[in-house]
Amino acid sequence: MSDFAYSYARPSALEQRPEGNALLLSAFSEEGLDAETACFFWGRLRNSWLAARGLSTLAKVVASRFVPQSAALRDPIVTAGAGQLRFEAFSSCNGVYARLDLGPEALDGEFLSSGTTNVDFNEPMVNALARISRTEPVLLSVGQKEVVLERAAGKVVERKVALPERWIKGLTSVQAYLALMEEKLRLTRVQAVQLVQSIPAGTAKADYYLVLRGPRPSFAPVASAGAVRVGGVHRLRLLEGLLPLCEAARVYATPDGQASAFVLELGGGQRFLLALSADVWRGFSGEGNQLETLMDELPTEWVSGANRLFRGNEVFNPSLFALEHDLAPDTVERLCASLSAMGLLGFDLADNHHFYRRLPFKLGRILSLNPRLKNARALLDAADDVQLVGVGAGGRTEARVRGTEVWHTVVVGGAEGPRCTCSWFSSHQGQRGPCKHILAAQMRYL
């Protein structure tokens, strides 16, 4: 493999600033920035009222729970770099993913470095966002250990907290789904508002399908050609406060209907994304849609070498990366899966590219956060836990794999796709990734 020779341009400070930035500089120099605490960005929000509405919607997402037994977690992830800020969050049940992107047009300040932090959205922050007026100047600082929102009425500081492992697993699955999505519909603001207003009252018990009949989109309980499956359609009410402010909305979906996404163009360099799992009870953290790509381990130095190249929010283009470093496409696909499994990759639907997050680099997360993969490798380490039964036409391979209490019959290869007699496969039919028995057979015989 090449030595990952790579260069990138560090985002420069803005050459021209409004007069108000003298106040900004004064505000941040009064107390002084701690030299030992990395500050990623400090500056002014150009349209603070619109940004506050986006952040309030994000807070609404993190405060929501669509599965009663899910634990309450309120932990937005903030990545600064490449001239933009990305605020990401999950609902507490992990079945809804939201992201607010603030591009260069939305910010007036300096990116001093790049990185990612993880904070809580507590009541003082939520209340401060709700009180921001249309013309109010607001200063924002994003650093390694805190996010600071400052306005004339006072300052709110959100301290860094530990990133839940469930969120890292969710980030892995979300970016894999987003990378597969295709644009299905484009809606005007009026169409988008009318669509959400048409959602049946209460909690949807069955799937709904988004269809376009003439100029008006609507939800139907029956699938039709070109319809977008939206499981738990009531979750879209999270967007009610933001839809009247958007310029347009785009609707995306995976080809197999396992996830959908709505992207709101807010104008002024601001964009909001809401992604939904296929069913309300399905959290993104349990999908396992990257497991097959993770079966073959890459050398540690390859993964750590790639990690050293990229800064927060920097574009990661797999095809270009393969050409620049003379790598086979399947190798780069495995590299992407490994980086994603540690929560380091996201995907920008509107611009159709991966972006990087600067999280702590921990290779051990690949196995610790993917117990099916870990258990499959344990089956292979045992002497007789995976046994060949026979090989049929078209590469169809049948094996016996030891389960917890019984042996399971596994079929891999062939045109029909992998199958297993275990309860996991029976329940999900491969829609939430392969079971450990299929993974073990694939790693042994394919």
Image (cartoon, grey):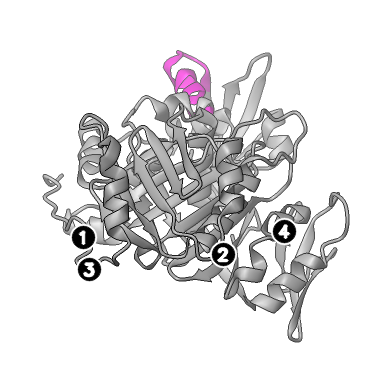
Is 194 covered by the magenta stretch? no
Q: Residues within 10 Å of mark 2 (few under 14, many from 20)?
A: many
- Do the numbered discs 1 and 3 sit on residues whose CB atoms are within 8 Å? no
Using the image, tell me which numbered label, if any, was put on residue 323. Answer: 1
Q: Secondary structure at mark 3?
A: loop
Picture residue at 15% right of the left edge, 47% below the top: 4
As shown in the figure, which amino acid type bears the numbered disc 3?
A: Gln
Is 379 covered by the magenta stretch? yes
Using the image, tell me which numbered label, if any, was put on residue 230. Answer: 4
Q: Earlier in the sequence, mark 2 or mark 1?
A: 2
Q: Earlier in the sequence, mark 1 or mark 3?
A: 3
Q: Earlier in the sequence, mark 4 or mark 1?
A: 4
Q: Of circles 4 and 3, which is in front?
A: 3
Q: Which residue is mark 3?
A: 16
Instruction: Indicate left or right for 108 with 412 as reference.
Output: left
Per the model, the C-alpha gap separating discs 2 and 1 is: 31 Å
Instruction: Indicate left or right for 341 with 272 as reference.
Output: left
Q: What type of secondary structure mainly makes up the magenta span?
A: helix
Q: Which residue is mark 2?
A: 263
Q: Which residues are magenta?
A: 372-386
Instruction: Indicate left or right for 348 with 239 as reference.
Output: left
To which quarter of the image does residue 257 belong? bottom right
Q: Of circles 1 and 3, which is in front?
A: 3
Quadrant where the N terminus sits is: top left
Q: Secondary structure at mark 2?
A: strand
Q: Secondary structure at mark 1?
A: helix
